[in-house]
Amino acid sequence: MISPAPKMPEAIPNELSERVAIVTGAGRGMGRAVAMRLAESGASVVVNDLEPSAAAETAESVISAGGIAMAVAGDISDSTFVDRLVGSAAEEYGGINILVNAAGILRRTAVIDMPEAEWDLVMNVNLKGTFLTSRAVLKSMRRSGWGRIVNFSSTAGKTTSTLGGAHYTASKHAVLGLTRHMAMEEASHSITVNSICPGLIDTEMVRQEIDTDRINRYIEGFPIHRLGEPSEAAELVAFLASDRAAYITGQGFDISGGDLMV
């Protein structure tokens, strides 16, 4: 029997007012839910996605809901673009306080068949992109004496991937290592760095990768018998991006319906 999804709590009004957030991979799925949730709490949101129309659609949805947003489309594995992304955010809003690295890519090829170019693609987006965007925002966060970086790893970062290949698993393990090390380096500047580790969340990417029958077989094995909702991942990110999480850093938070318990 599939468990019903809960009703999400309302955002704390203006909790993130006067904060500026960059959300990568915000054109769909969990990234889009994060952008909407941070804006609901008062943050000005810079929406990034590789696909310009997807970034624009999310930004328009934020604005239609009464929030503040701008879209900056491009490839976060390109350092030249990342500098432009951060520069555009600073020019428009005056600085960056929150970075959510939600952009990611998944491929399923087995190691024996994996082209080198595919390995590079997955690592460049999932790991290098997280590094480049994090590096680019740190000076602004240090100047303001406050910052929140939330990286998207995966339950694959603590075990092996359900859907992806070894490159996906390796990249998500590496994101957790990068998270811990940045947390150690930046703690004295009142910058926290954490990761969330989603399991199977009901996103377009998951629905594209596996059919309904396979999804239902997975659900039967989860202690909570359903897929996670993007809004649930966004709620966790919003908490980590707030002052309520000021004493939390260097952590990787599972959100998997109990699929992974360690």
Image (cartoon, helix red, strand yellow):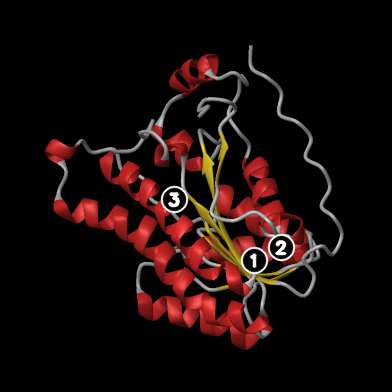
Residue 38 placed where, x, y %? Answer: 71, 60
User: Disc number at residue 43?
Assistant: none
Q: Nearer the viewer, mark 1 or mark 3?
A: 3
118 vs 33, left or right, is: left
Residue 136 visible in the picture:
yes
Residue 75 visible in the picture:
no
Residue 35 placed where, x, y %? Answer: 65, 59
Q: What amino acid is at disc 2?
A: Val
Mark toward the start of the polypeptide (1 vs 3): 1
Label 2, secondary structure: give it.
Answer: helix
Real-space CA distance between mark 3 and mark 2, rounded to the nearest whole angstrom: 30 Å
Q: Nearer the viewer, residue 194 or 42?
A: 194
Q: Is residue 2 above or below residue 237?
A: above
Q: Which residue is mark 3?
A: 176
Real-space CA distance between mark 2 and mark 1, rounded to the nearest whole angstrom: 5 Å
Q: Quadrant of the image for the N terminus?
A: top right
Label 3, secondary structure: give it.
Answer: helix
Label 1, secondary structure: give it.
Answer: helix
- For the point 42% across and 38% down, the residue is 158
Q: Are marks 2 and 1 in contact (CB under 8 Å)?
A: yes
Q: Is residue 24 above or below residue 195?
A: below
- For the point 46% across and 37% down, the residue is 155
Query: How would you rate the neighbour count of disc 2 (Cα within 10 Å): few for under 14, some for 14-19, many for 20 or more?
Result: many
Q: Are marks 1 and 3 in contact (CB under 8 Å)?
A: no
Q: Which residue is mark 2?
A: 62
Q: Is residue 71 above or below residue 221?
A: below
Q: Quadrant of residue 107?
A: top left
**Residue closest to the far right:** 13
Mark toward the start of the polypeptide (3 vs 2): 2
